[in-house]
Amino acid sequence: MINDLDLKETLGQLKVLDISSVLAGPLTGSFFAELGCHVTKVENKKIGGDPTRQWKLPEESIDSLISAYYASANYGKEVFLLDFNDAHDRQQLQMLIENHDIILSNFQKKVAEKYQLNPDYLHANYPEKIICQLSAYDYEDPRPGYDLVMQGETGWLSMNGLDEEHIAKLPVAIIDILASHQMKESILLALLKRNMTGNGSLIHVSLYRSALTGLANQASNYLMAGHIPKPLGTLHPNIAPYGDVFMTKDKSMILLAIGSDGQFKKLWEILGLSQEQYAEYQYNTDRVIMRKKLVEILQFGLNHLDVATFAALADAHNLPWCTIKNLEQVFESTDAQKCILESEMSGTQTKSVSQIAFEI
């Protein structure tokens, strides 16, 4: 949420042209629309617009011009459907490029060159503009970019799931989301540069490298210790009990995220477990090694507590834990309700989640 009036006035003067499709680029455009920028979206008229318009759940109306997926990434945009093979539409696109400050694109090189939308050409002809090009691997690489392929290519799939025979993808297009953050951050830096120098920028972002940035501690576990992570379900490879799931006396499923030896000591005490056994598990390294036996002991303690009693004890000692909620339960909360955006797109009332999690 932007409450600073000077900042809101400045952002309101910025114009963003989104000629990208699917998720990463459109999410970036939505972010700037939420900030108060004027965002124009150009979609391919020949195929009925952005492909995600057709990515509908069985519960959605087949007659609607948009899908819930499309609505999730296209908040607050003025939309034009153009055919780049049509001379009039090409002229309209040219005018849009000239009248916008930031241009978002994810065209492959061969398509971009066909329509003179390749980033080098745009940067050379409009040096004051910020051109942000998203590619799969590298702009010169002709391979298409799909989130699921990237999850496989960069190790995400190999780590996700219950075991090596039951791998799983992330339930959102996490690589696209990571790439969108890279796009936002680089554009904000480019805006700072333009404010200081008057010069625009040419930015290249890749899905592949964005995926690698998200590996964080898992990458360092391999690079420094030679550890190749395997699927662990909800478990954390370095910490226990962190991600371990338990059942309370009244059959409520809870998850623990104990991150320090001090927190573990408090957990052990509120569960009323044997002080003689505590010495075996007081240090995290030992808990990770003896995790299976540890889980059995903790579950024994939780067998005697209902979720309300455990919640009162855990919260009183500032321990990190949660019940495992579905999305219906999530959006019953007041905090989640505050993050919902409502708008009308193509005659359809839509709801999506805000891209902004900060306040200024």
Image (tube, rainbow, N blue to C red):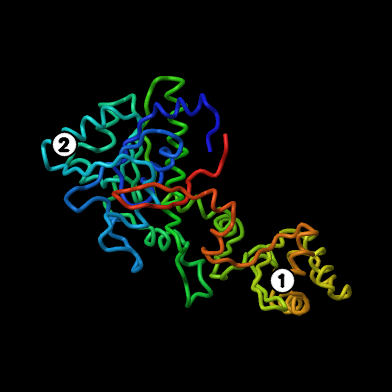
Residue that appears at 31% across and 61% down: 55
Amino acid type at image mark 1: Val
347 is higher (above) or lower (below) than 58: above
Q: Is residue 33 left or right of residue 249?
A: left
Quadrant (top left/top right/bottom left/bottom right) for the C terminus: top right
Disc 1, SS:
helix
How many neighbours does mark 2 have within 10 angstroms: few (below 14), some (14-19), or many (20 or more)?
some
Q: Residue at x 80, y 59 (%)?
A: 317
Q: What residue is rendered at 46% in x and 50% in y?
A: 178
Describe residue 166's horizontal placement relative to residue 281 as left or right: left
Alpha carbon separation for disc pair 2 and 1: 62 Å
Q: Nearer the viewer, mark 2 or mark 1?
A: 1
Q: Position of residue 226 (x, y in %)?
A: 58, 62
190 up-or-down from 237: above or below = above
Give whichever of 67, 314 is nearer the camera: 67
As drawn, the residue found furthest toward the right would be: 276
Q: Which labelled disc corresponds to residue 90?
A: 2
Q: Where is residue 203 in the image (x, y as percent from the top left)?
A: 38, 36
Circle 1: is it few (<14), some (14-19), or many (20+) Cα within 10 Å? some
The residue labelled by disc 1 is 307
Judging depth in this view, the residue of 149 and 30 nearest the camera is 30
- Marks 2 and 1 in Cβ contact (< 8 Å): no
- 213 vs 314: above or below: above
Task: Check the image and report above or below for 73 versus 96.
Answer: below
Residue 327 placement (x, y as % from top left): 52, 63
Residue 278, numbered label: none
Q: How many labels does the image show?
A: 2
Picture coordinates of residue 129 (x, y %)? Answer: 34, 28
Sooner in the amino-acid sequence: mark 2 or mark 1 = 2
